[in-house]
């Protein structure tokens, strides 16, 4: 791989940092008392599950945080400086040719906390939320938390490529009790980057039925080189019923900073959201986010080059050693959605199987709400040496099945 400015091949030790990937997997992937004994000691497990990266963040961001620490006060902090909104707005203009009204921008401690709040603020207890499946599980958890009914529309798979079932979505959004759709663009876990045509069709169906859309666009910057991203709201500039959720967390590996951008064009809903949101931010999170948007472009270019190569490597290995898997390099994200159903029964707990038999922590399809039997999700945002060993173990565990 070519030598570049940033060190994506560097292997970093995360033990002792309270990292969820290292310290929190038992409570998330398994029962805390689950017996994981198998072919590899737990201390040697390779972590390819939770959606953060094994890469050092951009030094430009680290330096900005260090500079902020030169001021010895870290008291209550708010987003008072308009330059933050302007830097994020410029990022959207440069990358997506989309501008938004900065007066519509609010913040959250993450997209998921915002989602939990917004579902409760939009839906009455007897109303329904639509998602497409497979789905990031917290979309379901957000509906459950607010005690509103979840309605699922299964994606259609053909030769490893996923599409929305618009006839099914039309039917389900026509129910007057369905008042909200939680949408994922680009989609997690499949990595589909929806085309303008698909976005227009989905948006029109929802809006014509009076359905508000929360569009989770947190993976929007993590694209393959030949792809471009279209924010859903950019196609409906006259609608105030599309809420856009973006964050530097996935793009720049800042998930622990707990800072997200939520664009709420509807004045009444924005007022309600702000009434319940405590506008106090972590001062280092604020500085990190602003420096990411203003100085992080070069780092992101090299990151996506590195990820593209990791995906090519995965595809080559699967085609060579596990030819009955179904896998298409995704348009976006650093997550691989792989169909291994040929090799397993539908009742197999794949997360547990690969922990015990490969010493690899990954997420099986049972963790993605519905329509995901026989799939695994692999996080490829890691140095190549980790990917090589993790994939070697996965392939070996499948062939020995």
Image (cartoon, grey):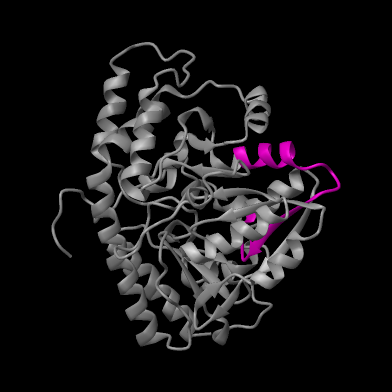
> Which residue appears at 75% of the width and 63% of the height?
172
> Which residue appears at 20% of the width and 48% of the height?
6
Residue 396 appears in which quarter of the rendering? bottom left
Q: Viewed as shown, does residue 110 lie left or right of 2?
A: right
Residue 401: say if magenta: no
Residue extent of the magenta highlight: 114-137
Q: Provide residue 326's location: percent of width, then percent of height.
A: 48, 81
Vertical arrangement, residue 341 with respect to residue 300, above or below: below
Nearest to the observer: residue 200 or residue 329? 200
Vertical arrangement, residue 209 with respect to residue 363, above or below: above
Question: Residue at the left extreme?
Answer: 3
Q: Provide residue 330's location: percent of width, then percent of height.
A: 42, 68
| Residue 10 visible from this viewpoint | no
Question: Residue at the right extreme?
Answer: 126
Nearest to the observer: residue 344 or residue 262? 262
> Which residue appears at 43% of the width and 43% of the height?
249
Q: Viewed as shown, does residue 148 lie left or right of 169?
A: right
Q: Provide residue 335's location: percent of width, then percent of height.
A: 44, 62
Residue 123: say if magenta: yes
Nearest to the observer: residue 390 or residue 203? 203
| Residue 13 visible from this viewpoint | yes
Q: Viewed as shown, does residue 194 lie left or right of 11?
A: right
């Amino acid at each position: 791989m070519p030598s570049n400015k940033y060190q994506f091949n560097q292997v970093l030790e995360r033990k002792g940092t309270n990292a969820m990937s290292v310290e929190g997997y038992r409570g998330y992937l398994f029962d805390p008392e689950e017996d994981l004994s198998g072919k590899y000691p737990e201390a040697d497990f390779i972590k390819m599950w939770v959606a953060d990266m094994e890469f050092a963040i951009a030094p430009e961001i680290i330096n900005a945080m260090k500079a902020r620490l030169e001021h010895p006060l870290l008291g209550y902090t708010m987003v008072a400086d308009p330059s933050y909104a302007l830097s994020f707005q410029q990022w959207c203009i440069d990358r997506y040719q989309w501008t938004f009204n900065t007066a519509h921008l609010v913040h959250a401690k993450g997209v998921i906390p915002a989602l939990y709040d917004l579902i409760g603020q939009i839906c009455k207890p007897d109303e329904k939320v639509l998602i497409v499946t497979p789905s990031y599980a917290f979309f379901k958890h957000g509906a459950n938390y607010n005690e509103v009914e979840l309605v699922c529309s299964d994606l259609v798979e053909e030769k490893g490529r996923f599409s929305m079932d618009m006839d099914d979505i039309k039917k389900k959004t026509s129910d007057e009790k369905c008042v909200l759709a939680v949408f994922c663009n680009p989609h997690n876990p499949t990595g589909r980057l929806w085309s303008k045509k698909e976005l227009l069709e989905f948006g029109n169906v929802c809006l014509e039925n009076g359905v508000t859309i929360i569009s989770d666009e947190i993976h929007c910057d993590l694209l393959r080189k030949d792809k471009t991203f279209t924010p859903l709201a950019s196609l409906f500039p006259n609608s105030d019923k599309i809420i856009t959720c973006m964050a530097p967390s996935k793009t720049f590996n800042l998930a622990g900073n707990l800072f997200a951008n939520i664009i709420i064009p509807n004045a009444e809903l924005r007022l309600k959201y702000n009434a319940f949101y405590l506008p106090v931010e972590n001062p280092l999170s604020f500085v990190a986010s602003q420096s990411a948007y203003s100085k992080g472009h070069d780092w992101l270019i090299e990151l996506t080059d590195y990820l593209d190569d990791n995906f090519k490597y995965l595809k080559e290995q699967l085609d060579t050693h596990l030819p009955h898997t179904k896998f298409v390099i995704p348009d976006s994200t650093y997550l691989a959605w792989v169909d291994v159903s040929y090799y397993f029964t539908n009742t197999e707990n794949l997360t547990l199987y690969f922990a015990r038999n490969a010493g690899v922590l990954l997420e099986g399809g049972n963790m993605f709400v519905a329509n995901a039997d026989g799939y695994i999700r692999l996080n490829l945002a890691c140095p190549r040496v980790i990917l090589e060993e993790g994939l070697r173990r996965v392939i070996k565990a499948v062939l020995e099945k």
